[in-house]
Image (cartoon, rainbow, N blue to C red):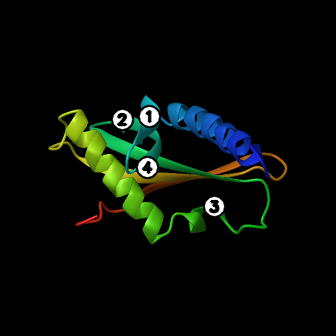
Amino acid sequence: MGGDHLVLGARGEDLAEKYLKKAGYRILARNYRCRFGEIDLIAEEGDSLVFVEVKTRSGGGFGHPLEAVDRHKRGQLTRAARRYLEETSATERFCRFDVVAVCLSGEPQLELVRNAFELEEGR
Protein backbone atom coordinates (compact mmCIF):
# COMPACT_ATOMS: atom_id res chain seq x y z
CA MET A 1 0.00 0.00 0.00
CA GLY A 2 2.74 2.49 0.91
CA GLY A 3 1.80 6.11 0.33
CA ASP A 4 -0.91 5.22 -2.16
CA HIS A 5 -3.64 5.88 0.40
CA LEU A 6 -2.18 9.36 1.03
CA VAL A 7 -2.27 10.17 -2.68
CA LEU A 8 -5.82 8.79 -2.90
CA GLY A 9 -6.89 10.83 0.12
CA ALA A 10 -5.36 14.03 -1.24
CA ARG A 11 -7.12 13.52 -4.58
CA GLY A 12 -10.42 13.00 -2.79
CA GLU A 13 -9.89 16.14 -0.72
CA ASP A 14 -9.10 18.15 -3.86
CA LEU A 15 -12.31 16.95 -5.51
CA ALA A 16 -14.34 17.54 -2.34
CA GLU A 17 -12.96 21.06 -1.94
CA LYS A 18 -13.91 21.99 -5.52
CA TYR A 19 -17.34 20.41 -5.07
CA LEU A 20 -18.00 22.31 -1.83
CA LYS A 21 -16.86 25.61 -3.32
CA LYS A 22 -19.32 25.14 -6.20
CA ALA A 23 -22.02 24.40 -3.60
CA GLY A 24 -21.34 27.76 -1.93
CA TYR A 25 -19.01 26.77 0.90
CA ARG A 26 -16.08 29.03 1.76
CA ILE A 27 -13.02 26.97 2.70
CA LEU A 28 -11.23 28.29 5.80
CA ALA A 29 -8.67 25.52 6.42
CA ARG A 30 -7.49 22.24 5.01
CA ASN A 31 -5.92 19.42 7.01
CA TYR A 32 -6.24 21.12 10.39
CA ARG A 33 -4.19 19.05 12.84
CA CYS A 34 -4.06 18.97 16.60
CA ARG A 35 -3.23 16.35 19.22
CA PHE A 36 -6.74 14.86 18.86
CA GLY A 37 -6.55 14.22 15.13
CA GLU A 38 -7.13 15.89 11.81
CA ILE A 39 -10.06 17.63 10.20
CA ASP A 40 -9.89 17.44 6.42
CA LEU A 41 -11.70 20.68 5.63
CA ILE A 42 -13.11 23.51 7.72
CA ALA A 43 -15.55 25.75 5.90
CA GLU A 44 -18.37 28.21 6.23
CA GLU A 45 -21.75 27.80 4.64
CA GLY A 46 -24.00 30.72 5.40
CA ASP A 47 -23.75 31.34 9.14
CA SER A 48 -22.58 27.78 9.88
CA LEU A 49 -19.06 26.69 10.63
CA VAL A 50 -18.69 23.28 8.99
CA PHE A 51 -16.18 20.57 9.84
CA VAL A 52 -15.88 18.28 6.83
CA GLU A 53 -14.60 14.72 6.82
CA VAL A 54 -13.67 13.42 3.37
CA LYS A 55 -13.61 9.66 2.80
CA THR A 56 -12.27 8.38 -0.49
CA ARG A 57 -12.37 4.89 -1.97
CA SER A 58 -10.94 3.63 -5.25
CA GLY A 59 -13.28 0.63 -5.29
CA GLY A 60 -15.78 -1.30 -3.23
CA GLY A 61 -13.26 -3.53 -1.46
CA PHE A 62 -13.33 -1.58 1.79
CA GLY A 63 -17.04 -0.77 1.74
CA HIS A 64 -18.79 2.53 1.14
CA PRO A 65 -16.76 5.56 2.28
CA LEU A 66 -19.47 6.67 4.70
CA GLU A 67 -19.10 3.43 6.67
CA ALA A 68 -15.62 4.59 7.75
CA VAL A 69 -17.07 7.46 9.80
CA ASP A 70 -17.75 5.24 12.79
CA ARG A 71 -18.13 6.12 16.48
CA HIS A 72 -14.36 6.24 17.00
CA LYS A 73 -13.84 8.60 14.03
CA ARG A 74 -16.75 10.81 15.13
CA GLY A 75 -15.15 11.07 18.58
CA GLN A 76 -11.81 12.12 17.07
CA LEU A 77 -13.51 14.72 14.89
CA THR A 78 -15.53 16.03 17.82
CA ARG A 79 -12.43 16.48 19.98
CA ALA A 80 -10.47 18.13 17.16
CA ALA A 81 -13.41 20.44 16.38
CA ARG A 82 -13.66 21.49 20.03
CA ARG A 83 -9.95 22.32 19.98
CA TYR A 84 -10.36 24.38 16.80
CA LEU A 85 -13.30 26.26 18.33
CA GLU A 86 -11.25 27.04 21.44
CA GLU A 87 -8.21 28.15 19.41
CA THR A 88 -10.29 30.48 17.26
CA SER A 89 -12.51 31.77 20.09
CA ALA A 90 -15.55 30.51 18.20
CA THR A 91 -17.07 28.35 20.93
CA GLU A 92 -20.43 30.12 20.67
CA ARG A 93 -20.67 29.65 16.92
CA PHE A 94 -23.17 27.24 15.36
CA CYS A 95 -21.28 24.36 13.81
CA ARG A 96 -22.01 21.06 12.17
CA PHE A 97 -20.24 18.05 10.72
CA ASP A 98 -20.58 17.17 7.05
CA VAL A 99 -19.11 14.15 5.30
CA VAL A 100 -18.14 13.92 1.65
CA ALA A 101 -17.88 10.41 0.24
CA VAL A 102 -15.70 10.19 -2.85
CA CYS A 103 -15.75 7.08 -5.05
CA LEU A 104 -13.02 6.94 -7.68
CA SER A 105 -13.87 3.72 -9.51
CA GLY A 106 -14.49 5.10 -13.00
CA GLU A 107 -15.81 8.66 -13.19
CA PRO A 108 -15.46 10.30 -9.74
CA GLN A 109 -18.71 10.33 -7.77
CA LEU A 110 -19.21 12.56 -4.74
CA GLU A 111 -21.92 12.38 -2.12
CA LEU A 112 -22.38 15.15 0.44
CA VAL A 113 -24.08 14.36 3.73
CA ARG A 114 -24.89 17.60 5.52
CA ASN A 115 -25.13 17.45 9.31
CA ALA A 116 -23.94 13.84 9.21
CA PHE A 117 -23.69 13.61 12.99
CA GLU A 118 -23.99 15.73 16.10
CA LEU A 119 -21.23 17.08 18.31
CA GLU A 120 -20.77 14.20 20.73
CA GLU A 121 -20.94 15.22 24.36
CA GLY A 122 -18.14 14.19 26.66
CA ARG A 123 -15.81 13.25 23.82
Secondary structure, mark 4, is strand
Residue at mark 3 to residue at mark 1: CA–CA distance: 21 Å
Q: Nearer the viewer, mark 3 or mark 2?
A: 3
Labels 3 and 1 touching (C-beta < 8 A): no
Q: Amino acid at mark 4?
A: Gly
Q: Is residue 116 visible?
A: no
Secondary structure, mark 3, is helix
Q: Is residue 118 visible?
A: yes
The residue identified by callout 3 is 65
Residue at 77% from the left image edge and 65% from the top image edge: 60
Picture layout, residue 30 above or below residue 103: above
Residue at 69% from the left image edge and 38% from the top image edge: 11
The residue identified by callout 1 is 25
Residue at mark 3 to residue at mark 2: CA–CA distance: 23 Å
Q: Nearer the viewer, mark 1 or mark 4?
A: 4
The residue identified by callout 2 is 44
Labels 2 and 1 touching (C-beta < 8 A): yes
Picture layout, residue 120 above or below residue 46: below
> Dot 2, crowdedness within 10 Å: few (<14), some or many (≥20)?
some
Secondary structure, mark 2, is strand
Residue at mark 3 to residue at mark 4: CA–CA distance: 19 Å
